[in-house]
Amino acid sequence: MSSVPSFFRYHVFFCTNQRAQGETCCQNHRAKDMQLYMKQRIKSLGLNGEGQVRVNSAGCMGRCDAGPVVVVYPDAVWYTFVDQEDIDEIITTHLQQGQIVQRLRLEVQP
Amino acid sequence: MSSVPSFFRYHVFFCTNQRAQGETCCQNHRAKDMQLYMKQRIKSLGLNGEGQVRVNSAGCMGRCDAGPVVVVYPDAVWYTFVDQEDIDEIITTHLQQGQIVQRLRLEVQP
């Protein structure tokens, strides 16, 4: 639809929403820690900024039962994750090599 | 890149970041109010949910000087806005009709 290139090559959004205690939510799985970890890794690799990668936190993205979730736009690819190794794999495989990490990918239809 | 359809037809992110008083930031321009307004309008139009539209808040998206900013993915189209009329135009023209609102669009290179 757009003839203008994306401002960020990859724009990554982590749901870091915290719901009331006991309710399923991404923040129950250290989502904020993982978002900050990816943000720092992207910066240390020199991949941050315009034309490259932006790593954001976001409010509830409506996929609580599949959480923790992160989405990579404009590709619209959703992942779940457990730890820093998973985040590293998303960085290396998707954000650096442009390939989908099938192991961590969420199905569109749960 | 992906053969799977986008979980949300349009995923809209408002920067609602509040920086220290006096610093340029989106929240100085009622970004959170406008995000909630769009979210409620989308719901009242029956456009919310899977396969349709999701309206999210997000942390700083790094375009403070152009703010307030909102980005529509997977199209990767960025807008600024002033008031509810601008939000209504983005809803009607972009999210319902699939056309870009050129009047409000941000240039990729500021």
Image (tube, coloured by chain):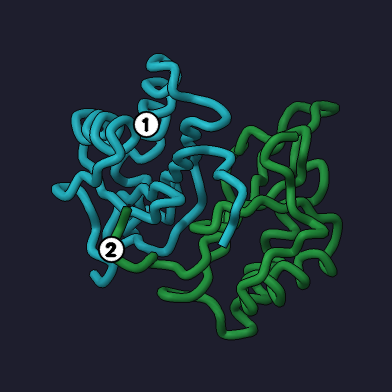
Chain colours: A green, B cyan
Query: In the picture provided, is A81 more to the left or to the right than B25?
Result: right
Is B37 rendered above or below residue A38? Answer: above
Q: In which chain is the residue bearing label 2? A: A
Query: In the picture provided, is B55 more to the left or to the right than B92?
Result: right
Q: How many marks?
A: 2
To which quarter of the image does residue B20 belong? bottom left
Residue drawn at 39 percent across, 56 percent down? B76
Label 1 sits on a secondary structure element that is helix
Residue drawn at 50 percent across, 34 percent down? B54
Q: In terms of depth relative to the viewer, which is nearer, A89 or B85? A: A89
- Give the label on residue A108, or none: none
The residue tagged 2 is A3
Classify 10 Å Cα crowding around label 1: few (below 14), some (14-19), many (20 and above): some
Q: Quadrant of the C terminus of chain B?
A: bottom left
The residue tagged 1 is B33
What amino acid is found at the position of numbered circle 2 in the picture?
Answer: Ser
Residue drawn at 34 percent across, 68 percent down? A5
Query: In the picture provided, is B100 more to the left or to the right than B40?
Result: left
